[in-house]
Amino acid sequence: MSAPPDLPEIVSRAFDVSRKAGYVSFCRNETGRLLATLAATRGGTLAEFGTGCGVGTAWLRSGVRNGAHILTAERDPRLATAAAEIFREDDHVEVLEADWSLLHERGPYSLIFLDSGEPEAVRVDAVVDLLEPGGIVVLDDFTPCEMWPPITYGRVDTLREEWLTDERFTAVEVMIAPDASALIATRR
């Protein structure tokens, strides 16, 4: 995948915080560049479920224009504190030490970034009402699949199938690297 080698300064800071915290589960650069690109098209409020140490949030922030605001929730107090430090002086980012369900009280959102690692929490029905019309959902951490229905670990990937076929969304799976894909869905 072709991409500039330099990272936005805010993303570099988030990687530094992640390393110091010993946290290695974070948004890939390929996904991050996608998030920054999509965030640049959004106004209003963007949300992220599962901040970690703030790498995905930093990628979103690197793309934000038009005064958009990012709200992100992390339930691990240590990680939430680390992420909040990155954005301490940034009026465009609010890090909450909370379960992502708290974000239900603050929507609707123009863009939501979800980790597909918790399938029940990110099902279409759990998310659809959090999005404004025309709002975008990005789900990452998929393994590319060239068949239908999509198969993961020898089973039908019902989460991916659900997002790609729900009539309330126009959705597509995009490869972000040879071993990784993401789903992008826009609420109709």
Image (cartoon, rainbow, N blue to C red):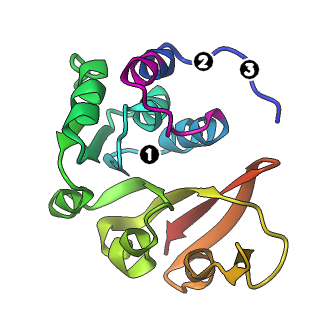
What is the spatial separation of the Cα atoms under label 2 and label 1, in whole angstroms? 21 Å
List x then y, in percent, for residue 122. Answer: 41, 69
- The disc, 3 or 1, on the residue closer to the chain's N-terminal end is 3
Tag nearer the camera, 3 or 1? 3
Marks 2 and 3 close (CB-CB < 8 Å)? no
Secondary structure beneath label 3: loop
List x then y, in percent, for residue 89. Answer: 22, 16
Range of magenta residues: 16-29
What is the spatial separation of the Cα atoms under label 2 and label 3, in whole angstroms? 8 Å
Residue 150: in magenta span: no
Q: Which mark is residue 7?
A: 2
Which residue is labeled 1 in the image?
A: 42
Secondary structure beneath label 2: loop
Q: Quadrant of residue 131?
A: bottom left
Q: Residue at x 77, y 50 (%)?
A: 179
Q: Quadrant of residue 170?
A: bottom right
Residue 27: in magenta span: yes
